Each structure stands twice: as structure tokens, then as C-alpha cells.
Image (cartoon, helix red, strand yellow):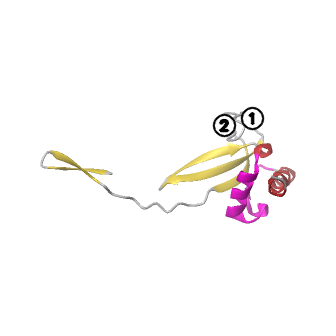
């Protein structure tokens, strides 16, 4: 909707904006603070712990980040993640995440697909 003022009157015009949605992006990362809550269990993601951050594009030029404990990955989330990347090896990893932690998270995601 868009408001247009002409001759002192305000008219509302329907301007349907076409938004081409982008797939969500995911990243295995370290929590920079302890303020975020897990999307699944609603518990706090403590500072310095490994998390999975999902960036969702909600409209043009606007995105939001959802986080989740690796242990809170379920089959629906794992399926959505694999629909974007095809394999867990392609999921981005933050620079502060160790190889062992990244491998552990990837195995957790894969196990949720195998055993929903």
C-alpha cells in the first residue's frame, strides 16, 4: 500500500511489491553473548557455546537471525538445512569454531535425518 497526497486528499494505492524469497542461510557459529534463546527449547544459548545460526530473509533488505542449540536440531530443521545445502559439509562454519565442534554438529544434523 502506498499513500499519495493530491489536492489535499490522501489516496491509498495498492502497490503489490514482488519479493523473490531467498533460501535461509545457516552457519555453525560461536555465541557472542548469552542473550539469544534457542528457537526449539526456548533456553538461553550461553556465551561461547556452539550454536547454529539461521538467517531468514523476511523482506527485501531485511533479515533476522534465529539460533538453535546443536542438540535441539530436529528432523524438520535438518531436512530444511539439507534442502539448501545438499550436504552438511557445505554448511558454513564460523572462524572461531574448532574442527572437532563443527564435525560434531554436522554428525548431529545427519543423525536427525537418519533417525527422525
- Kindly indicate the quadrant of the structure image that contains residue 66: top right
Q: Which residue is mark 1?
A: 46
Q: Quadrant of residue 89?
A: bottom right
* Residue 9 placement (x, y as % from top left): 16, 46
Q: Horizontal and vertical percent for residue 17?
A: 39, 59
Q: CA distance from mark 2 to mark 1?
A: 8 Å
Magenta-colored stretch includes residue 64 = no
Q: Is residue 1 above or below residue 69?
A: below
Which residue is pictured at 76% across the width and 47% down the height?
73
Sequence-first tag of 2 and 1: 2
| Left or right of 10 on screen, residue 116 | right
Residue annotated with mark 2 = 36
- Residue 80 lies, in percent from the top left, at 69, 57
Span highlighted in magenta in the image: 73-97
State whether residue 15 is above or below residue 51: below
**Residue ranking furthest to the left:** 7
Q: Residue at x 80, y 57 (%)?
A: 113
- The disc at residue 96 is none
| 39 or 104: nearer the viewer | 39
Q: How many residues crowd around disc 2 within 10 Å: few (fewer than 14), some, or many (20 or more)?
A: some
User: Which element is circle 2 on?
Assistant: loop
Amino acid at each position: 500500500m502506498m499513500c499519495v497526497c493530491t489536492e489535499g486528499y490522501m489516496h491509498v494505492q495498492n502497490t503489490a511489491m514482488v519479493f523473490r524469497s531467498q533460501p535461509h542461510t545457516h552457519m555453525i557459529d560461536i555465541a557472542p553473548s548469552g542473550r539469544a534463546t534457542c528457537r526449539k527449547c526456548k533456553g538461553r544459548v550461553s556465551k561461547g557455546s556452539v550454536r547454529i545460526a539461521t538467517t531468514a530473509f523476511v523482506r527485501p533488505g531485511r533479515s533476522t537471525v534465529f539460533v538453535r542449540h546443536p542438540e535441539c536440531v530436529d528432523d524438520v530443521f535438518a531436512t530444511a538445512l539439507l534442502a539448501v545445502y545438499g550436504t552438511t559439509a557445505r554448511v558454513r562454519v564460523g572462524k572461531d569454531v574448532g574442527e572437532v565442534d563443527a564435525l560434531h554438529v554436522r554428525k548431529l544434523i545427519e543423525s536427525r535425518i537418519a533417525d527422525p
